Amino acid sequence: MRIFIMFMIVLGFVIAQDDYTDKMEKEHRNDKPIAAPIAKKDVKDVTAKDVVYATVAGKEVTGYIAHPKGTTQGLPAVIVIQEWWGLNDNIKTMARKIASQGYVALAVDMYGGNTAETSKQALKLMKKAMGNQQQALDNLNQAHNYLKNNCKATKIGSIGWCFGGHWSLRCGLLFEAKIDAVVIYYGRLVNDKEQLAKLSAPVLGIFGQLDRGIPVESVNTFHEALKSLNKNADINIYPKANHAFANPSGTRYNKEAAENAWEKTMAFFAKHLK
């Protein structure tokens, strides 16, 4: 009986994961990772490069680190987590934008060095990453350790979009008191109160009213759960905005909503990390 129960739990997890990835494929179907104008603007006074920050399952993981010119030491830091397309040039631009505000920004690679140009490719990469939760968590844990030990980060936050939004939340749950701020851009949510009780970091949530992959009902349930636990949460749902509205790697970019969300994000990090 016990084996049967465990089997049903695992089966339910797999089905839930497949349902989530399928929803993301529907949201991004016919979409392409085309850079919006915001991603084409370079950032001044920032140094950036590729860096090996982890070894997962015996393989080195190369991310992208950006920081203000002159130092990587003794600054607040942000773990930057890719969206559906992978660690592409757009995400690297976002890391440089964060770094320009006085942070060390480490953009992690969750796809084993691969990026996607089509939704079919992205679906395959995302399913593989979601199918190995332990390796993904190990990846993020080593990213956190790299910032803490190699960069002597004073405080550490996380930010992610879509696929990365889910993992940004998981950073808050994984590191508990060791993470200082969590930003979620339309990522899959955790609504279980027992899990959310572990969350000590303040949360900024950015969502779109028209998002069918992360529907408003789910966002409201998440918000109510956080409020019932007396968690520090600022949840924003942007009217007439779709999934990926703030992400420059796609065709759904909504300039007005994205710029407002970015202002909130920078103010949130400044309040909790500086």
Image (tube, helix red, strand yellow):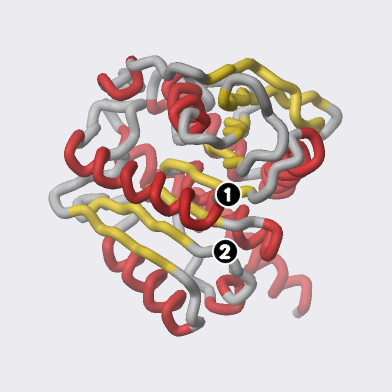
Q: What secondary structure is found at the residue carrying circle 2?
A: loop
In this view of the protein, can residue 114 be seen by the observer? Answer: yes
Q: What secondary structure is found at the residue carrying circle 1?
A: strand
Residue 141 vertical placement versus 227 (above, below): above
Seen from the viewer's position, the closer of residues 114 and 167 is 167
Q: Image point 39% across, 57% down: which residue? A: 205
Residue 156 spot, x, y in % from top left: 63, 48
Q: Image point 70% across, 58% down: which residue? A: 178
Q: To which quarter of the image does residue 6 belong?
A: bottom right
Location of mark 1 (residue): 157
Q: Image point 63% across, 44% down: which residue? A: 131
Q: Do labels 2 and 1 touch, CB within 8 Å?
A: yes
Q: Is residue 147 left or right of residue 42?
A: right
Residue 60 vertical placement versus 5 (above, below): above
Residue 271 spot, x, y in % from top left: 47, 56
Seen from the viewer's position, the closer of residues 189 and 98 is 98
Q: Image point 44% across, 28% down: which residue? A: 97
Disc 2 to disc 1, C-alpha distance = 9 Å
Q: To which quarter of the image does residue 104 belong?
A: top right
Seen from the viewer's position, the closer of residues 68 and 21 is 68
Location of mark 2 (residue): 201
What residue occupies the far left of the structure in this picture? 240
Seen from the viewer's position, the closer of residues 111 and 93 is 93
What residue occupies the far bottom of the structure in this picture? 228
In this view of the protein, can residue 85 be seen by the observer? Answer: no
Which residue type carries mark 1? Answer: Gly
What residue occupies the far right of the structure in this picture? 58
Residue 232 vertical placement versus 154 (above, below): below
Which residue type carries mark 2? Answer: Ala
Give the crowd class for mark 2: few <14, some 14-19, many >=20 residues within 10 Å.
Answer: many
Residue 44 spot, x, y in % from top left: 44, 17
Mark 2 or 1 closer to N-term? 1
